[in-house]
Amino acid sequence: MDFAPIWLTLKLACVTTLLLLAIGLPVAWWLSKGRSFFKIIIEAIITMPLVLPPSVLGFYLLLAFSPQQGVGKWLQQTFNIQFVFSFQGLVLASVIYSMPFMLGPIKSALQQLPVSLSQASYSLGKSRWQTFIRVLLPNIKPSLLTAIVLTFAHTLGEFGVVLMIGGNIPNVTRVASIAVYDSVEQMDYHAANVYSFILFAITFVLVTSVFIFNKYQLKSPLE
Amino acid sequence: MICIDIEKKIKTYQGQQALKVSGDFAAGSIVKINGPSGAGKTTFLKIVAGFIQPERGNIIVNDRVWLDTALKISLSPKKRMAGFVFQDYALFPNMTVKEHLEYATADNEWINHLLKIGKLETLTTHKPQYLSGGQQQRLAILRALATKPQLLLMDEPFSALDPENKTALINELKLVFNKLGTTVFMVSHNPQELEELAAGLGKSSTLFINN
């Protein structure tokens, strides 16, 4: 039994979640502050992967980063980076595809915090950064955890987009969801069942943990 | 001396109105702000603190220009550092009573003095959700004073306090204001509170806001 696809999937989910956390926090904060036409367009683009067929996104990424032309060719020649049929490509596709799962809960939680919390912090002589780290972020912990877990779990389950840009290269781009499909194609139902069960179990434990944590967080100790 | 002359368009149930406020106020004085609901009293305090930008105006606090729309000067709330007591308290749910004050100042002696004034010495490790309404309101006042502000803006600061606690706190606050030379702008629907705070401090004035 080859467990490499499981490890590759977990590695991809970890890298994607960390990258999205770094990108998502400042972007969600920016989006949560006021509305403008530009922000609406950016938010629409970020939300697109929720409704777009993964194969469509994968197809455009494949075209954009093909080493034969445009950006892909330039990246290959200048930095020797190839996104197509490589782990980097999977990470790039996963970051784009899972972005709404990281940004949505964080942005929504920041918007729900009273504006007076930030104002109180500013009036004490604190900067935006200090206010974000010391006041805003600690008060959106449940949503932050939800965003992290949803992003991680969603990346575990990606199929179409990673298949389009990464293909099915063992130890490089063959993640668990592709291994399931591949095993079924080869009539190896035992392997398909093992991969599927592991993915199911990890996802179930993660999502259940979030519900338990958030219930504990939201419950008033005075009740 | 604090010199204010501002103009801001605000939306009311009667449509768009202009909030116009001007006046010179002695440093260290108590300014009692009166006016009907929706007249813009809270908006005025927020303009002074720098949270809201007026269309036109000047604010000079102790010879320092905080706002001059003609010269396009507007100090950020961080630089103005006006103490602000919010109507909804705006306490930080993640911080204990002591952490609120430690977030504002590193002066432990001052923190202990404030805790004593607010009768919160025994509740230092409690987060806001474990405090009563009156205790939360007292913490909001103490936090605003923690930075020893030149200007303190208070929006209905005693509404949740019982008469006994209110009188005791007001007497302590007067001592603090005298010691720090703080100028206080206070909005209240209770004229007695305003008079009680102003009594004995010598300098006080009334600002009536009605757009």
Image: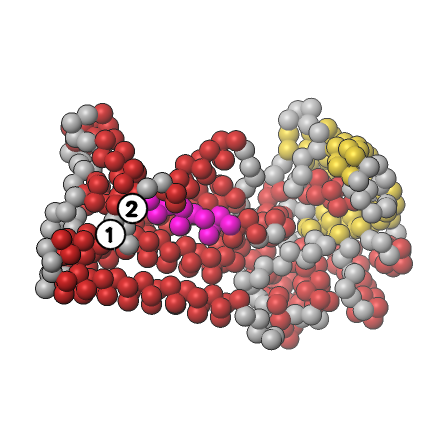
Q: Is residue A186 above or below residue B82?
A: below
Measuring from the top left, give residue B1's x and y in whole percent: 78, 39
Q: Is residue B189 above or below residue A164?
A: below
Q: Which residues are magenta?
A: A94-108
Q: Is residue B123 above or below residue B197?
A: below
Which three-letter amino acid code belongs to the residue tagged 1?
Answer: Leu
Q: Is residue A1 rendered to the left or right of residue A25?
A: left
Say which of A122 and B88 sits in front: B88
Marks 2/1: CA–CA distance: 8 Å
Residue occupying the point 88% across, 52% down: B202
Mark 2 secondary-structure assignment: helix
User: Dot 1 corresponds to which residue?
Assistant: A12
Quarter of image, res A4: bottom left
Measuring from the top left, give residue A108's x and y in whole percent: 51, 50
Measuring from the top left, give residue B17's x and y in whole percent: 80, 33
User: Dot 2 corresponds to which residue?
Assistant: A94
What chain does badge 2 belong to? A
Question: Colour scheme used in the picture?
Answer: secondary structure
Q: Is residue B17 magenta?
A: no
Say which of A45 and B124 sits in front: A45
Q: Is residue A102 magenta?
A: yes
Q: Quadrant of the C terminus of chain B?
A: top right
Residue occupying the point 41% across, 54% down: A147
- Residue B132 visible (yes or no): yes
Mark 1 secondary-structure assignment: helix
- Mark 2 touches mark 1? (CB < 8 Å): yes
Say which of B23 and A95 sits in front: A95
Which three-letter amino acid code belongs to the residue tagged 2?
Answer: Ser
Q: Main secondary structure of the magenta part?
A: helix
What chain does badge 1 belong to? A
Residue occupying the point 25% across, 49% down: A159
